[in-house]
Image (cartoon, rainbow, N blue to C red):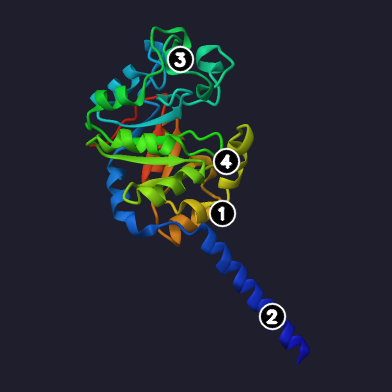
């Protein structure tokens, strides 16, 4: 009798743990069809850049080239010290501009004087990118949120409110996605995830936590964007197979990987080559 009772308690505890886990990683699957509408597009990572042609990532020529060739665009947005939305990827300016500072620590007037990888091109404002693209192709916008502050979110929302083209947002930081969940639920939002994404401070911690997708309980994303080498994580597999929400794969750097990911996932984000797409 006692053994049977212990077995029942163990079974109930295990069931409770499974249900709790599923509740934590559960996405918002109600917008699946809207997300799938973006699967017809292939996303050029930070624009269709090509340093052999003198076109750096996240530059206006890279975005123009992507739009002209019919590729959707993935880009990154930081908030400058004076409240401007600058399009730039890295945590610091070291790699792209040879300056060991962050975008968040500088006014845009200072950033505008810098040049990307010793080319003539500068860090653009999001408003410039929106004006250039003019809705010709969809945008996948990653919010860069290195701290708990979500001050970027209402400014980004205000900028996009006047934009008529299609777009999605994504972030490693679930706090920004929670802001959109609360204030702009109609905007499609995606949780970024990968097993290894080093970064300092809170953002680094949230990136590590994102690997399990336990932070879905905060962001309740409509889609997942995962490193294509890390799709075997339990959270990602359950979001795709059990909850059946779209999964975007990044960053694809070869035609072989491109073709494989196109078959398996909703969206493909590529860089470093121009994919051959069958008619």
Query: Which of label 3 and label 1 is nearer to you?
Result: 3
Mark 4 — residue? 207
Q: Position of residue 233 (x, y in %)?
A: 56, 51
Between 86 and 43, which is closer to the camera in this rendering? 86
148 in relation to 101, above or below = below
209 in relation to 16, above or below = above
Q: Residue at x 54, y 44 (%)?
A: 230
Q: Earlier in the sequence, mark 3 or mark 1?
A: 3
Mark 1 — residue? 214
Task: Examine the image and state in which quarter residue 88 appears.
Answer: top left
Farthest front residue in view: 82
Whether residues under marks 4 and 2 lie with C-beta atoms below 8 angstroms apart, the answer is no
Whether residues under marks 1 and 4 lie with C-beta atoms below 8 angstroms apart, the answer is no
Q: Earlier in the sequence, mark 4 or mark 2?
A: 2
Q: Earlier in the sequence, mark 2 or mark 3?
A: 2
Mark 2 — residue? 9
Q: Earlier in the sequence, mark 1 or mark 2?
A: 2
Alpha carbon separation for disc pair 1 and 4? 11 Å
Q: Position of residue 194 (x, y in %)?
A: 55, 42
Q: Residue at x 30, y 35 (%)?
A: 160
Q: Residue at x 39, y 24 (%)?
A: 273
Alpha carbon separation for disc pair 4 and 3? 26 Å
Relative placement, left or right, of 255 versus 209 is left
Alpha carbon separation for disc pair 2 and 3? 61 Å
Whether residues under marks 4 and 3 lie with C-beta atoms below 8 angstroms apart, the answer is no
Alpha carbon separation for disc pair 4 and 2? 35 Å
Whether residues under marks 2 and 3 lie with C-beta atoms below 8 angstroms apart, the answer is no
Q: Which mark is residue 111?
A: 3
Q: Which mark is residue 265?
A: none
Relative placement, left or right, of 212 versus 29 is right
């Amino acid at each position: 009798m006692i053994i049977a009772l212990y077995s029942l308690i163990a079974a109930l505890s295990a069931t409770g743990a499974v249900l709790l886990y599923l509740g934590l990683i559960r996405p918002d699957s109600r917008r699946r069809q809207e997300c799938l509408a973006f699967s017809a597009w292939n996303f050029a990572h930070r624009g269709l850049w090509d340093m052999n042609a003198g076109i750096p990532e996240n530059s206006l020529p890279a975005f123009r080239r992507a739009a002209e060739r019919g590729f959707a665009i993935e880009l990154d947005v930081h908030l400058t010290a004076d409240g401007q939305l600058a399009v730039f990827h890295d945590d610091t300016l070291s790699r792209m501009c040879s300056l060991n500072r962050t975008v968040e620590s500088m006014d845009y007037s200072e950033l505008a004087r810098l040049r990307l990888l010793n080319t003539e091109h500068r860090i653009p404002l999001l408003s410039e990118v929106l004006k250039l693209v003019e809705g010709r192709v969809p945008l996948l916008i990653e919010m860069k949120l290195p701290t708990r502050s979500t001050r970027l979110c209402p400014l980004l929302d205000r900028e996009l409110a006047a934009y008529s083209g299609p777009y999605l947002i994504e972030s490693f930081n679930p706090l920004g996605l929670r802001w959109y969940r609360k204030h702009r639920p109609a905007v499609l939002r995606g949780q970024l995830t990968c097993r290894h994404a080093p970064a300092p401070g809170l953002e680094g911690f949230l990136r590590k936590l994102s690997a399990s997708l336990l932070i879905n309980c905060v962001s309740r994303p409509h889609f997942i964007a995962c490193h294509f080498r890390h799709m075997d994580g339990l959270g990602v597999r359950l979001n795709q197979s059990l909850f059946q929400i779209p999964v975007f794969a990044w960053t694809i750097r070869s035609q072989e990987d491109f073709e494989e990911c196109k078959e398996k996932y909703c969206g493909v984000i590529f860089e470093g080559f121009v994919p051959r797409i069958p008619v």
